[in-house]
Image (tube, rainbow, N blue to C red):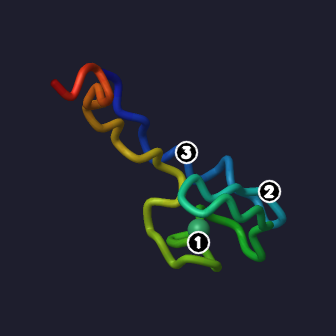
């Protein structure tokens, strides 16, 4: 795994279009820098996808 260094912040100039991966809200940043949270759902993980849960197979049988 490669951790992205702080240079990442430079890729968020003012007006960057963002999409919240949690609630799906699209918005644009007002100031330079990565938004700390989604303006809609206030999740600080707006840019992180939820961890995929183990999908429990359902409906296979029942008996
Ligand atoms: Zn959101």
Q: Position of residue 29 (x, y in %)?
A: 75, 69
27 relative to 42 in the view: left or right: right
Say the numbered circle drawn on residue 8.
3
Element at label 2: strand
In this view, the mark in front (3 or 2): 2
Q: How far apart are marks 1 and 2 (CA)?
A: 12 Å
Indicate if the residue with disc 3 has its beta carbon within 8 Å of ligand 1. Answer: no
Question: Is the residue indicated by label 2 positioned so its CB lies within 8 Å of ligand 1?
Answer: no
Mark in the foreground, 3 or 1: 1
Q: Distance between the residues labelled 3 and 2?
A: 15 Å
Q: Which of 42 and 8 is in front in this view?
A: 42
Q: Is mark 1 on a helix, strand or loop?
A: loop
Which residue sits at x=30%, y=30%?
58
Of helix, strand and loop, which one carries label 3? helix
> Where 2 sits versus 41, above or below?
above
Q: Is mark 1 within 8 Å of ligand 1?
A: yes
Q: Residue 12 carries which label?
A: none
Marks 2 and 1: in contact by CB < 8 Å? no
User: Badge 2 local density, few (<14 within 10 Å), some, or many (20+)?
Assistant: few
Dot 3, crowdedness within 10 Å: few (<14), some or many (≥20)?
few
Please provide percent x and percent y for residue 41. 55, 76
* Label of residue 17 in the image: 2
Task: Please report whichever mark, 3 or 2, sits nearer to the chain's N-terminal start.
Answer: 3
Q: Name the residue under label 1.
A: 38
CA gap between label 3 and label 1 equals 18 Å
Could you tell me residue 60's position as x and y percent? 28, 20
Looking at the image, is mark 3 or mark 1 earlier in the sequence?
3
Residue at 28% from the left image edge and 25% from the top image edge = 57
In the image, taking residue 13 as reference, residue 62 lies left or right, namely: left
């Amino acid at each position: 795994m490669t951790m992205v260094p702080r240079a990442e912040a430079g890729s968020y100039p003012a007006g960057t279009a963002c999409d919240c991966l949690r609630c799906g809200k699209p918005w644009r940043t007002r100031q330079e820098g990565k938004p700390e949270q989604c303006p809609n759902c206030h999740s600080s993980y707006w840019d992180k996808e939820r961890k995929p849960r183990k999908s429990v197979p359902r409906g296979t049988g029942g008996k």
